[in-house]
Image: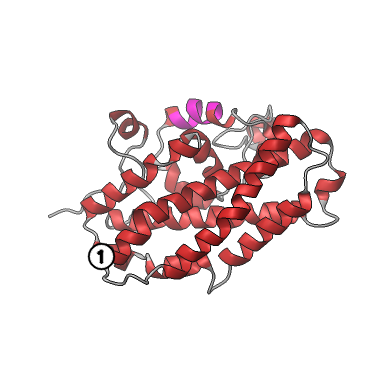
Amino acid sequence: MSTPEPTLPIEQGSSFWRWLFPTKSKKFNHSDYHESFVFGQNAVHLIISRSLEQIVQYSKPGGAFLSADLTTKLAFLKYVDMFRAFLDIHHFQEDLYIFKEASNRSANTALFQQETEEHQALEGGLATLKTLCEGAAAGGDVENVSIQKIHEICDAILKTMSGPEGHLAREEAILNVEFYRKYYTEAETKKLSQDIHKIITEHMHRGLSLVFMIFHLEDGEKAFFDERLPWFLKTFLFPRWAGKRSADVWKFASHPRFDKNQRAVYEAATDDSVA
């Protein structure tokens, strides 16, 4: 009996999304859907860490934010708010569909007790980020936004998340491929993927969420998506979604990509194309 080709962990219930996201893999020869799902899960963790590092570095005392012009400051606040929405979504997904269910299946109700408590402890800081960033953007009061507060909140989150004993590492140590194979069938893992991706549109534009992910991955890491996303999405839809934010915003991402006209795109312009 042949092993089914892995698919990208996204909602598979819609024929539209099934068309946008094909199922065959080339370079990433995952043996089953569990491996693909864990790859996607850990990629999200990597994106969270990288975006936090970007924010903490730029907002540090005496850092670049203080001397930036108004346009750049506003772009940075929009970037911070995208990160906030991205992390909020991730926590909602884990709280609703992963922590409780995984604890029940493994018959260990305390399995994610520390992680759940940390999510709750971070809620206040994330709410403050939302208020600061959206308030400044809406009222135009960018100069008086408390960049120190933004730095303190994001630095605290980064410290919670990072390190070999940090929040993300502990989750990955538990929610590995072996765990999913032991407690979830492949069909159940696909259903889990559908459920957690339905939450995205409740809190963030789904296309914008994808752009945020891609712009925090190196080319080698992005190859996982290169093989699954059709040319139409990468060529036409991706720039439209990226265009919901200015290039000034995306420049704060760790790995943004632009064409020769400085338009945010899926594949960066090569030296030949620029010439």
* Observer-nearest of 129 and 217: 129
As drawn, 56 above or below 198: below
* Observer-nearest of 121 and 234: 121
Q: Could you say which quadrant of the image residue 212 lies in?
A: top right
Q: Could you say which quadrant of the image residue 233 lies in?
A: top left
Answer left or right for 2 relative to 21: left
| Residue 238 is covered by the magenta coloring | yes
State the residue lying farthest toward the left. Answer: 1
Q: Give the magenta-colored segment's residue range.
A: 233-240
Question: What's the residue at 77%, 39% (across, down)?
Answer: 73
Residue named by callout 1: 105
Residue 207: where, in percent of width, then height? 48, 34
- Quarter containing the N terminus: bottom left
For the stretch drawn in magenta, what is the main secondary structure?
A: helix
Q: Secondary structure at mark 1?
A: helix
Question: What's the residue at 61%, 60% (across, down)?
Answer: 157
Question: What's the residue at 28%, 30% (across, down)?
Answer: 15
Residue 125: where, in percent of width, then height? 62, 54
